[in-house]
Image: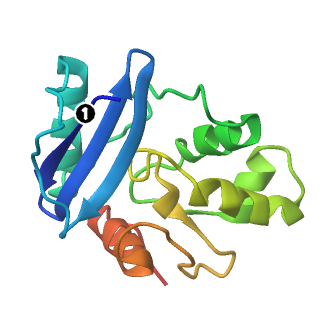
Amino acid sequence: MPHATFRTPLGGCAIAWSERGLTRFLLPDPERPAGGDTEAVPPDWVGAIIARVQRHLAGEAQDFSDVRYDFSHVPEFVRAVLTATLGVKSGRTATYGELAAALGQPPGASRAVGSALGGNPWPLLIPCHRIVAASGKLTGYSGPGGVDTKARLLALEGAQLL
């Protein structure tokens, strides 16, 4: 699978793609080296996404809802959760329960929503960091830096945190 790593103000990111769309995105990690022997030169459409990620992480909010994602290996429920998450715009947050309700699911489905977001192949681009607990508390985040990274991303986007 072709992939590339690149630098951002918050550390190295990685992105992978296929002819169908993006297959994977890895959040900034200060430990991730940028550039390597097995990397591919990104096609123009991927290069444009890389530039948008760099601008976003430099404080110029971007909306990634127009990106072509390769959902071919994503289960239907997870795909629905990820698609709904794209509707939570920069500077805003939603709760796991609100996301479940938006999908026509009962409040008890908030755990399933959280599990689906925990496996998000495109964190940041599909903004799972914008989903918070019903109390407004920042809970679980599987990216490098955990909840601290979630808080940093939300602050960068101007979200009001409790």
Find residue 81 and report its image quarter: top right
Estimate the x, y position of residue 50 in percent, counting from the top left: 20, 38
Q: Amino acid at mark 1?
A: Ile
Residue 149 position (above or below residue 98): below
Q: Residue at x 33, y 35 (%)?
A: 16
Q: Residue at x 66, y 53 (%)?
A: 116
Res 19 visible: yes
Res 66 visible: no
Q: Residue at x 83, y 59 (%)?
A: 109
- Could you tell whether 122 is left or right of 88 in the image? left
Residue 49 position (above or below residue 35): above
- Could you tell whether 70 is left or right of 135 in the image? left
Q: Residue at x 11, y 45 (%)?
A: 36
Residue sitting nearer the eye, 33 or 148: 33
Estimate the x, y position of residue 90 in percent, counting from the top left: 39, 53
Residue 23 position (above or below residue 111): above
Q: How many marks?
A: 1
Give SS at disc 1: helix
The image quadrant where one finds the N terminus is: top left
Q: Crowding at label 1, few (<14), some or many (≥20) Cα neighbours within 10 Å? A: some
Which residue in the structure is indicated by mark 1? 49
Estimate the x, y position of residue 51 in percent, counting from the top left: 15, 37
Point out the residue furthest to the top here: 19
Find residue 97 and report its image quarter: bottom right
Estimate the x, y position of residue 3 in percent, counting from the top left: 26, 35
